């Protein structure tokens, strides 16, 4: 009987490895974005703070910025919020938010309660702009250079480690950004 | 309206698959004829519903309905009609739908073929296939619905991934998937035999043609994929040991082992539990392939969709299907006894070596594919495994396999003596060694020892596999399709070995920088660069270079490799230009603009590379011939369906 159980044992071992692999895959951020090295998709969306005004991608040309996709319905966005606040306080670059498939009131309440790290928040209620950016799920964060080219994409919550090891080096030494 | 109709059809298909699974397995278990009678209508209804869903999605693509998210993400109004149809499987959701459609078609084929099978056994086979369908439909509806709407609709689509806009890709996934999914049939036969607790030689004879056909499709699919990567990706290689390629290659290796193991079970009633295990593993690897490609666990150049949430679902599905089958195996396989024995040197022993070596090969590929993941999981750092690992380890099991092949096909069943065949093998080997060494050192000088060994083995396989059929013809005997098919498949292997040897050893590759009017001289060919000009395509613009290729002063071809910029996705792709000349494959890829009219060009001259793909198609042709042999069609079963005999129901 024993040797016939062997395949099952090997298979279960493999399942454990794969399960750990899945658990690790999102925070590795290794899902390559076809956008990397290409111009950031254009958008012109109503601003969360003042819906009569627009947040437009062309106004952001000429400087580095972080493009952060979030929503009040997303648990991990709450987890990364503190980091984003620290990032915005550091003043190295502006953080632009994309409020994805969300209600405006809840989003405003969230920002007044937790603090607002965003220089501007664009409202993407139907998710069209998120599709243009190839977003699979919130939160996702893109680093865009002054030429308007996406140089880095992070999937999952931004941590201080992400900021110091991945984002900051690319901004301060743009030649190594890839 | 159409997307909702398709969605609804898919939900109905799910319900019908559940009925098919329940009535098939429970009906056979409790021997209820009326329950089993409901299986075939469920299969038919399921197939119609799945076809309706696919039809609806194709109609959305053809009609440019950009209110459907999947269409908006993978098509564009400027996309030619042909690619609007093939865009169906351009991304994850549609690929799954294609998978489900093919499974439905295979199931219908089993129903048609199953008229010769005992009723309870057929019901169990269809029941297991129903469970597989059910799993994939649940997966699609829960995590990957292709019919989701956008509100408001997109004004235009984001276009199909440009590297997928190619005739090769249009046919590659359906054929590859037909092979993948086809192993589900062998899997279902294995599960049904285990549920029944009985496995005889009839079982092997029923299973063989299905397995061989699936294998033939998989062979074609892999060859097409390799060909597509060769001329579309423009990197000038035909096999990269990429995780996605490996995902299709592992089931192929195990499937090849299964075909041979089934032959032993069919002819001699041996290797029963081993054959069952191979049938389970072949399909498990097909599903694992889906898992690796679609979950984002392993990132590869090929994967166009990756999503961890889907990975969790597939993993759960794998645990149920594969874990269930292997548990059944651990429980039932010990009951299967073989009485017969065989001597060392008998054909059985060679087929055993064949199986062991193929499984080792699959295991080394498996280890190399998963090593980066395991090393990452165990925090051993990031590891990258490439050709320096795969090429030698793979060769380590393939060289003995190729060396034993020629002897094995001349060995007798049961008895170990080769007798009069010894001399024949010796003659063919000497002839092969002379020809092989001549090829390596004469035509493609200078060769290495390894390439001489490779060429010799390849030629030996070709010569020795031709001996038997030629002898039969000489003696005026008929040539059954099974023999003809086997011979063709082995000839294909021989050709592949020869081609891979020469390509690996004698490829010339050079990157040159040329100004207009300048020439480069590579491997006996002259390449004159005549500058670049702009070209307009339907949904892209391109720069095309003109390069005049000549060989010893005579013009061979005017090649025009392109660099294309697709408007919507702003992606640049390289279109290589390829010309066959005297068995050589001359490949040109346009590189970078170096300024002042100068461009970099990649030139490759690969001897006999096309033979690699031709060899694969010959193997597939051999497989389909063998599967259509009369003995499978006339293998009608005399024994009555064990409907009344519920007493023998174990457990």
Image: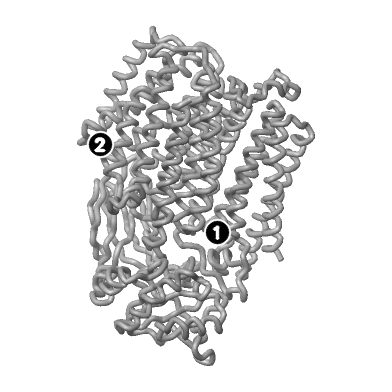
Residue that appears at 49% across and 68% down:
B539
Residue B243 in picture, x, y percent from top left: 39, 48
Is residue B410 visible in this depiction of the protein? yes
Residue found farthest to the front: A113
Q: Quadrant of residue A174?
A: bottom left
Which quarter of the image is occupied by the N terminus of chain B? bottom right
Left/right placement of residue B468 relative to residue B375 reads right
Q: Residue at x 31, y 34 (%)?
A: B395
Q: Is residue B13 above or below residue B305?
A: above
Location of mark 1 (residue): B87
SS of the residue under disc 2 = loop
Marks 1, 2 in one chain = yes
Dot 1: element = helix
Q: Is residue B226 visible?
A: no
Indicate which disc, 1 or 2, sits on the residue closer to the N terminus.
Answer: 1
- Residue B474: x and y in percent read 49, 13
Callout 2: few (<14), some (14-19), or many (20+) C-alpha neighbours within 10 Å?
Answer: few
Residue marked by disc 2: B444
Q: What residue do we see at 55% from left, 29% from top?
A: B625
Residue B290: x %, y % from top left: 49, 48
In the image, residue B567 sits, relative to residue B255, either above or below, namely: below
The image position of residue B140, as x and y in percent, is 59, 55
Q: Chain of mark 1?
A: B
Report whether B312 appears left or right of B128.
left
Classify 10 Å Cα crowding around label 1: few (below 14), some (14-19), many (20 and above). many
């Amino acid at each position: 009987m024993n040797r016939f159980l062997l395949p099952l044992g090997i298979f279960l071992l493999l399942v454990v490895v794969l399960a750990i692999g899945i658990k690790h895959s999102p925070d590795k951020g290794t899902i390559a974005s076809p956008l990397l090295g290409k111009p950031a998709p254009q958008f012109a969306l109503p601003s969360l703070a003042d819906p009569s005004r627009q947040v437009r991608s062309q106004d952001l040309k000429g400087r580095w910025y972080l493009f952060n996709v979030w929503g009040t319905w997303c648990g991990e966005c709450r987890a990364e919020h503190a980091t984003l606040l620290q990032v915005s306080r550091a003043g190295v670059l502006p953080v632009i938010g994309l409020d994805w498939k969300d209600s405006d009131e809840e989003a405003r309440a969230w920002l007044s309660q937790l603090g607002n790290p965003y220089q501007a928040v664009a409202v993407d209620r139907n998710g069209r702009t998120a599709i243009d950016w190839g977003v699979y799920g919130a939160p996702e964060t893109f680093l865009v250079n002054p030429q308007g080219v996406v140089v880095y994409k992070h999937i999952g919550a931004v941590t201080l480690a992400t900021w110091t090891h991945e984002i900051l080096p690319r901004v301060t030494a743009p030649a190594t950004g890839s | 309206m159409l997307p909702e109709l398709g969605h609804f059809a898919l939900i109905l298909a799910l319900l019908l698959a559940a009925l098919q699974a329940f009535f098939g397995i429970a009906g056979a278990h409790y021997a209820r004829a009326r329950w089993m009678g409901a299986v075939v209508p469920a299969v038919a209804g399921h197939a119609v519903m799945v076809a309706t869903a696919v039809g609806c999605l194709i109609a959305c693509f053809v009609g440019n309905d950009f209110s459907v998210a999947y269409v908006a993400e993978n098509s564009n109004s400027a996309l030619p009609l042909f690619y609007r149809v093939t865009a169906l499987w351009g991304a994850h959701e549609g690929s799954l739908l294609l998978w489900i459609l093919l499974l439905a078609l295979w199931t219908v084929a089993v129903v048609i073929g199953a008229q010769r099978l005992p009723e309870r056994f057929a019901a169990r086979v269809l029941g297991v296939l129903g469970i597989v369908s059910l799993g994939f439909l649940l997966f699609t509806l829960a995590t990957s619905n292709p019919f989701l709407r956008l509100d408001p609709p997109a004004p235009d689509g984001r276009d199909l991934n440009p590297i997928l806009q190619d005739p090769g890709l249009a046919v590659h996934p359906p054929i590859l998937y037909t092979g993948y999914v086809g192993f589900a049939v062998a899997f279902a036969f294995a599960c049904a035999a285990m549920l029944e607790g009985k496995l005889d030689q009839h079982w092997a004879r029923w299973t063989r043609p299905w397995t061989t056909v699936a294998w033939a499709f998989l062979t074609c699919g892999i060859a097409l994929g390799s060909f597509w990567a060769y001329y579309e990706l423009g990197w000038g290689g035909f096999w990269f040991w990429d995780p996605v390629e490996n995902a299709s290659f592992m089931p192929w290796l195990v499937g090849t082992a299964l075909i041979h193991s089934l032959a032993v079970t069919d002819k001699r009633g041996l290797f029963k539990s081993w054959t069952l295990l191979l049938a389970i593993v072949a399909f498990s690897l097909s599903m694992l392939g889906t898992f690796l490609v679609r979950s984002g666990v392993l990132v590869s150049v090929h994967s166009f969709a990756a999503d961890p949430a889907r990975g969790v679902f597939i993993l759960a599905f794998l645990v149920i299907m594969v874990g269930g089958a292997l548990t059944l195996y651990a429980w039932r396989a010990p009951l299967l006894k073989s009485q017969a024995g065989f001597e060392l040197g008998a054909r059985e022993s060679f087929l055993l070596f064949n199986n062991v070596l193929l499984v080792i090969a699959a295991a080394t590929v498996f280890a190399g594919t998963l090593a980066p993941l395991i090393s990452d999981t165990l925090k051993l750092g990031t590891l990258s495994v490439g050709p320096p690992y795969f090429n030698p380890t793979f060769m380590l099991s393939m060289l003995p396999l190729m060396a034993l092949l020629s002897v094995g096909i001349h060995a007798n069943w049961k008895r170990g003596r080769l007798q009069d065949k010894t001399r024949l093998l010796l003659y063919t080997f000497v002839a092969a060694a002379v020809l092989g060494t001549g090829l390596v050192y004469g035509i493609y000088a200078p060769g290495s020892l390894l390439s001489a060994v490779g060429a010799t083995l390849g030629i030996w396989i070709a010569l020795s596999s031709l001996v038997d059929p030629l002898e039969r013809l000489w003696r005026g005997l008929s040539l059954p399709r099974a023999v003809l098919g086997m011979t063709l498949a082995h000839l294909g292997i021989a050709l592949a070995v020869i081609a891979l040897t020469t390509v690996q050893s004698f490829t010339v590759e050079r990157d040159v920088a040329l100004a207009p009017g300048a020439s480069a001289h590579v491997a006996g060919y002259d390449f004159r660069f005549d500058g670049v000009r702009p070209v307009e395509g339907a949904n892209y613009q391109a720069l095309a270079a003109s390069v005049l290729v000549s060989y010893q002063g005579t013009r061979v071809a005017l090649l025009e490799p392109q660099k294309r910029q697709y408007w919507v996705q702003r992606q640049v792709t390289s279109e290589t230009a390829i010309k066959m000349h005297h068995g050589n494959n001359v490949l040109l890829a346009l590189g970078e603009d170096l300024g002042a009219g100068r461009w970099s060009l990649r030139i490759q001259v690969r001897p006999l590379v096309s033979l690699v793909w031709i060899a694969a198609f010959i193997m597939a042709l051999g497989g389909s011939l063998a599967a259509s042999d009369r003995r499978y069609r006339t293998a009608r079963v005399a024994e009555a369906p064990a409907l009344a005999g519920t007493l023998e129901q174990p457990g």
